[in-house]
Amino acid sequence: MIDDKYLTWFNEEFGYVDGLTWCSATSPHDVLAAYGVAAAEAEPATLALLPELRLLVGRLGKGTLVIQPNGCPTNDVLRPLAQYGPCLSVHWSDTTPPGITYVTGEKPAIFFDPFDWEFIPEPDIESVNKWISATPAGHDTWKDDWARAALITAESLFGEKVDEKWVRASHTGVPQNAS
């Protein structure tokens, strides 16, 4: 479970990024293809290089964690990734409203603003409320602390938790100047 100590550590490590996407059954190659990036443009990278990267993609269990220092994935990126298994994307930024997106291969994407669920929910507020209540975090945790709820949901859905070892490891990086 995500305790206060872990949440604080996670926020310190990832608080400066705009978007995190957990993809349950994808490889870094699948992610590059969904973003339209040639494999030759990718290079080994660590989280320390994030300011110089467009994307950082790391294996996490059977899937990947995709980190975007600027921006967030569109449904055009998430849909191809969801064909392999569910994807949970969390983004916050100074330039766009925060959002939670959950995509599977079979159903319409769930999207909501974690601060105001009724602000442009997709496909509708009833679907958003139903999904929130069915997550491992549950309705009350989403209402009380959406960041904790997102991490609980990601950890449960994808069977892995980001730890210090993952943060320090080498992953697949896409430089800012890549296509």
Image (cartoon, helix red, strand yellow):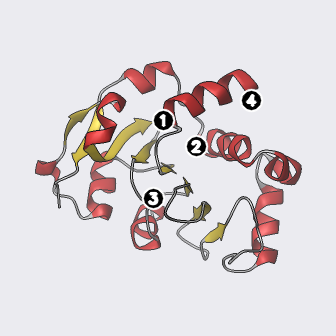
Residue with the most extreme front position: 94
* Secondary structure found at label 2: helix
Instruction: From this view, report whether residue 28 is shown above or below residue 101.
Output: above
Q: Which residue is mark 3?
A: 84
Label 4 Cα crowd, 10 Å radius (few <14 / some 14-19 / many 20+): few
Q: Are marks 2 and 1 in contact (CB under 8 Å)?
A: yes
Instruction: Residue type at mark 4: give it.
Output: Met
Instruction: From this view, report whether residue 132 is shown above or below residue 9.
Output: below
From mark 4 to mark 3, how far is it between C-alphas?
26 Å
Q: Which mark is residue 158?
A: 2
> Total number of numbered labels?
4
From mark 2 to mark 3, how far is it between C-alphas?
12 Å
Residue 25 drawn at (x, y percent)? 46, 49
Considering the image in quadrants, where does the C terminus appear?
bottom left
Looking at the rendered image, the disc whose residue lies closer to the viewer, 2 or 4, is: 4
Q: Are marks 2 and 4 in contact (CB under 8 Å)?
A: no
Mark before the other along the chain sequence, 2 or 3: 3
Considering depth in this image, is 91 or 126 the residue closer to the camera?
A: 91
Label 3 Cα crowd, 10 Å radius (few <14 / some 14-19 / many 20+): some
Instruction: Residue type at mark 2: give it.
Output: Phe
Mark before the other along the chain sequence, 1 or 3: 1
From mark 1 to mark 3, how far is it between C-alphas?
14 Å
Residue at left 24%, top 64%?
Answer: 36
Instruction: Residue type at mark 3: give it.
Output: Tyr
Q: Which residue is mark 1?
A: 61
Mark before the other along the chain sequence, 2 or 4: 4
Q: Which mark is residue 1?
A: 4
Instruction: Residue type at mark 1: give it.
Output: Gly
Instruction: From this view, report whether residue 169 is shown above or below residue 78.
Output: above
Mark before the other along the chain sequence, 4 or 3: 4
